[in-house]
Amino acid sequence: MSAILVWAEITDGRVKKPVLEALTAARAWAESAGLPVWAAALGKEIPDAVLSTLAEYGAEKVIRILSPALEPLVNSAYARALAHLMKEKGLSYAVLPQTYDGKAIAPLLAIEADAALLSGITQAPEKEGTGWKARRIAFSNKAIEWVYTEYPRVIATLRTNSVVPAKAPKPLATEEVSFTPEAKDLRLQPTGVEKVATDKVPLTEAEIVVSAGRGLKGPENWGMVEELARVLGAATACSKPVADVGWRPHHEHVGQTGIQISPNLYIAIGISGAIQHLAGVASSKNIVVINNDPEAPFFKVADYGIVGDAFEVVPRLTEAIKRYKEQHAH
Amino acid sequence: MKILCCISHVPDTTTRIQFTADGKALDRSGVTFIVNPYDDFVLARAAELKEKNPTGVHVTVLCVGQNGASSTDSVDANLRKALALGLDEAVRIDAQPADAYFVASQIAAYARGKGFDLLLFGKESIDYNGSQVPGMVAALLDLPFVSYATSLEVENGKARLTREITGGKELLECPLPLVLSAQKGLAEWRIPNVRGIMQAKTKPLHVVPPVSVEPRVKTLKHELPPPKGAFKKIEPDKLDELVQELANKGLI
Ligand SMILES: Cc1cc2nc3c(=O)[nH]c(=O)nc-3n(C[C@H](O)[C@H](O)[C@H](O)COP(=O)(O)OP(=O)(O)OC[C@H]3O[C@@H](n4cnc5c(N)ncnc54)[C@H](O)[C@@H]3O)c2cc1C
Ligand SMILES: Nc1ncnc2c1ncn2[C@@H]1O[C@H](COP(=O)(O)O)[C@@H](O)[C@H]1O
């Protein structure tokens, strides 16, 4: 029996939201294809919690590919393992979360599995004629592109934060498929990881992002931004010039040349809204702009706008949120 | 050491995007095309490696594309701009990019057997934002692939790299040859100087015919995102109103 396969990326022993989104989109795709959804979990060992989460989000079968050589993750080994699985089980379709590793593995897998690649789609592919059509974002948030393929095998990567993860519990069924990477799959040797010391949510996964720009005048003024983010449980971001002059770390820079995000809420403080900045954030579902210049271009894409001095507005907004949270604490 | 830098030809970052009446293609009239900004990082890193070892490093710049009707839509002009950074020769594969598989197949066909040690790409093109071509080239040529690289050092046939991952960076080692896609950080953007621009005029630019490849994905149509209506204005002294609105939407 065939199925739609989801690569269940495991991060720090857990599956994170992008995988749940991929499972949710895969279910919609599976429905129009008349297929079940399977998940593939790869690694040295797979924690039980991962298996049960995958079943809870609709995987009718979880296939484990276990090998010490699959940790740490090397993209080519993962691509070959997934291609091997697709071939052995006769699977034609797969969904990968569009995370750093998902984006790296997908094009390799498309070649290994001889498939078409639909990259960064925002919803499940829809049946059209004898093929599949899908919606994606192009021109750095400035356009929507509808793509189409009739190729017999299709790999899709799902843009993060495009689909709301929904549970669809299935009884847990697992199977093991064996695969051992060859030396050539492991030419790339990870030698270490440097985590950015932070207790905050990573920018790419955050549902709320508080971002600030040159309007804040200097790095010493970021305390109020951090505080607003803390109260909201948000990640912090910044504009390019702010990272370039070293007021903020580079990994916070969003935009055309930085990180592209689409959180549910983006709060832009003292950022003008240059087109290159918007290229990274304009697909955020709700945008709040705080700027003392009523003509700032950012207001054109705002849902809510506050014309005012950030140094007054931000602390007050933080207080208002704290007040609300206290009143509504259960 | 032989380096191949692949660049794409994309609308300037400030372009107001518009499409042809049937929505199938970008309306190129009046649009200025530039070297993809991520590819500029790659060109700058290649130029640095070349400067350190002018006789031992040879850099080829490659683009799959055709020159447009206007002077602001010239692949050749962008290839020459790249050469002006002090790089050696340019190649244009004379075909309109059909999809990522088509482009990757052209690049792989050109590079196969030529002994490139480093095949350098940007992390994505700012037009279709696919992030597909570099990985496909790596798989087609059966080479290791480092994605989102933020640094690259080469020593004794081996590369030491860092790449961006969620919440940090990963350190890597890899024997050459390898394929890399660049994230910001790989090098500082460079602007060519007058001498470089003059020299670039006479450097070789080879136009190569494409190999025959069937694309796998096609564009049905483009749409512009629906225009945002006027935003809701919140007075700086009525922030509770904003908080209530955000709470109503389940955001707080
Ligand atoms: C190829 C290319 C790529 C680029 N990529 C990116 C990118 O990825 N990301 C990015 O961000 N930029 C990018 N840029 C730069 C971009 O064009 C802008 O220069 C940049 O976004 C401006 O940053 P800013 O809004 O912080 O600063 P400014 O443009 O200086 O704006 C500061 C804003 O703060 C407001 N302000 C000042 N004081 C206050 C106050 N007290 N209270 C409230 N508001 C105040 C001002 O009204 C103004 O709107 C790129 C540029 C190029 C050419
Ligand atoms: N037509 C092209 N010619 C040469 N290189 C390209 C072309 N299109 C994309 N690339 C390279 O592949 C990278 C990623 O592009 P993409 O996969 O289209 O997002 C770019 O940054 C370029 O380095």
Image (cartoon, coloured by chain):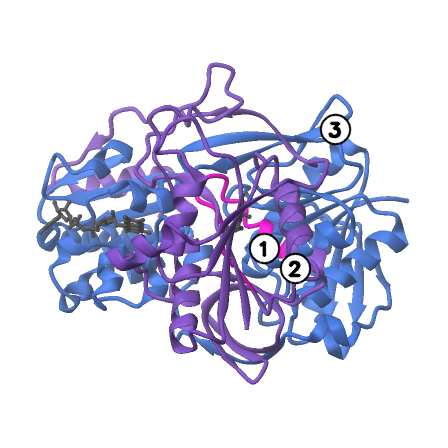
Chain colours: A blue, B purple
Q: Nearer the viewer, residue A73 or A107?
A: A107
- Residue B138: mark: 2
Where's residue B208, x and y in %? 60, 44
Distance from disc 3 to disc 2, alpha carbons, whole Å, reads 27 Å
Toward the front, the furthest residue is B202
Say which quarter of the image contains residue A283.
Answer: top left
The answer to whether the residue labelled 1 contacts the one labelled 2, judged by CB atoms less than 8 Å apart, is yes
Q: Are marks 1 and 2 on the same chain?
A: yes
Left or right, B119 with respect to A155, comes to left
Q: Secondary structure at mark 2?
A: helix
What residue do we see at 19% from left, 50% from top?
A: A317
Circle 3: element type = strand
Q: Residues within 10 Å of mark 2 (few under 14, many from 20)?
A: many
Residue B186 visible in the displayed image: no
| B129 magenta-colored | yes
Q: Which residue is mark 1?
A: B134
